[in-house]
Image (cartoon, rainbow, N blue to C red):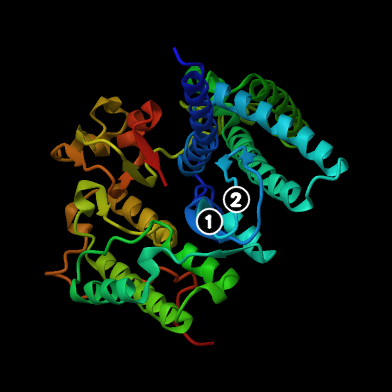
Amino acid sequence: MAGQSDPNLSIFSAEEVEFMAEDELVEIVPNMRMDKLTLICGDYGPFFPQMPAQVPLWLAIALKKRGKCTIRLPDWMSVENLSQTLEAERDSQESFQVLPFHYVEISRLLFDHARGDIPDVYTVRSLIEDIRDVRFHKVETSLESFEDARSSAVKVKNLSAMEVNLVRPFVGRALQAFYKHGSPELVPNPERMPPRRPQATDNVQRRPLRKR
Amino acid sequence: MDARDGDGSTEEYETLIQTTDVELLKRAWRQEKAAPEILKFETDLIARLTGQIELVEENVEQDAQSGIDPLTVSLYQMDLDRSQFLLRSYLRIRLQKIEKYIFHILATAELYNRLSKQEKAFAKTCLVDLEKHLEESVLSKLPSNYQSIFKQSMISEENDMVAKPQLDTFVVCKTNYYLGHIQLEDNEDGPSDDRANQRPLEEPFEMEPDVLYFVRYKAIKRFVEEGRIDLF
């Protein structure tokens, strides 16, 4: 067939995923007065000193950069909630905990731009990193089985935006290959096959058979 | 009716419309990026947003000159930049798809009708230029049996040099509804795809709301077009 669709065409760049995350609402406490903003993406404000207000993350960061507000940490980012999430994440091998769809990007943006507003910033940061690692590992191991590959639809419950974006090229093409070959024997069955780690990032050429 | 109430509700209504327009564009942009084929052009939405963007552009320019708080102006500018980015990116992906599948789109009425007026004009000029270029640089120098743009040679039965989108691509998607009985195999596809017909029939697949799935685009194409499934 002449036309193969370019696998890169449909993939979002990390910046684009971050762009989407910047529209998520956060709470800020302004330290200045400002009239209502009638933006294309919605109306925000008016802002009064010490009066909490809901704004999109990009707006919060813009104000924060100019020292006009403090950003309130979202509830799910408190040390207590994150510790619970991490524990639950470690306890269950199959399922993923419910986190905001853009948790990776939101936390990253807050660490980059609003460090001072996060109590226990080091603990929070390491908790988020641990959660991310546990989840990524789980994503990798769950790819080994491809349980539902035979039905040509695979459920990935509670996966976050960044995680989906990372596994998309690999999983998408793998499923497509299974689908094309079409015979159920080709779908790896964890009971019959020795576990093998799929390498999502393996773009390197295969080892040559003979050394030169 | 109380006048104030009336005003309040129109204002709320307008806010709702405004919020949804950018959200809608973001959704259309995501869909367009994720779908292998070209989707229907969002004529009304794009017209509304272009209008809004132009208005804000003028306002920002005026505000900047009239000495309004530079912070406020810069926030308006940022908002404007974000909307413009979405709009540009949306239009650009569509142009890329048109360029890539130009012969296929122009030969398929259903796809051709999904283009906007400007896109149709673009596709036509693009076609003329491409044909001329291929003709002059390669085809005219080949033996007469091999001069078709659409076919490898005269004996090809199909137009096998026409790039078509791969509808078998797996996409990531989510729905807000409960969708039962999605047939994953393409029965309606006819005898063209022998392999699919040989395959044992699978049970219809159900989609739970708010859960992400990897699914073959073809199986959910209908729902994407109806706006009941979101691509991610």
Q: Mark 1 lies on which chain?
A: A
Is residue B154 in view from this perspective? Answer: no
On the rendered structure, is B27 left or right of B78?
left
Closer to the camera in the image, B111 or A94:
A94
Q: Does label 2 lie on the same chain as label 1?
A: yes
Q: Do the residues labelled 1 and 2 touch (CB within 8 Å)?
A: yes
Closer to the camera in the image, B105 or B84:
B84
Closer to the camera in the image, A78 or B138:
A78
Q: Mark 2 packing: few (<14 Cα in 10 Å), some, or many (20+)?
A: many
Question: For the view shown, which residue lies furthest in the top direction?
Answer: B1
On the rendered structure, is B85 left or right of A115?
right
- Going by the numbered disc 1, the residue's amino acid type is Met
On the rendered structure, is B114 left or right of A99?
right
Residue A61 horizontal/vertical position (percent): 60, 61
Name above or below for residue A64 compared with residue B149: below
Closer to the camera in the image, B232 or B205:
B232
Residue B161 horizontal/vertical position (percent): 55, 34
Q: Residue A51 carries which label?
A: 1
Mark 2 sits on what residue? A47
Name above or below for residue B173 compared with residue A145: above
- Going by the numbered disc 2, the residue's amino acid type is Phe
Q: Mark 2 lies on which chain?
A: A
Question: For the view shown, which residue lies furthest in the right direction?
Answer: B65
Question: For the view shown, which residue lies furthest in the bottom direction?
Answer: A211
Residue drawn at point x = 69 percent, y = 49 percent: B75
Residue drawn at point x = 24 percent, y = 48 percent: A182
Residue B5 horizontal/vertical position (percent): 46, 21
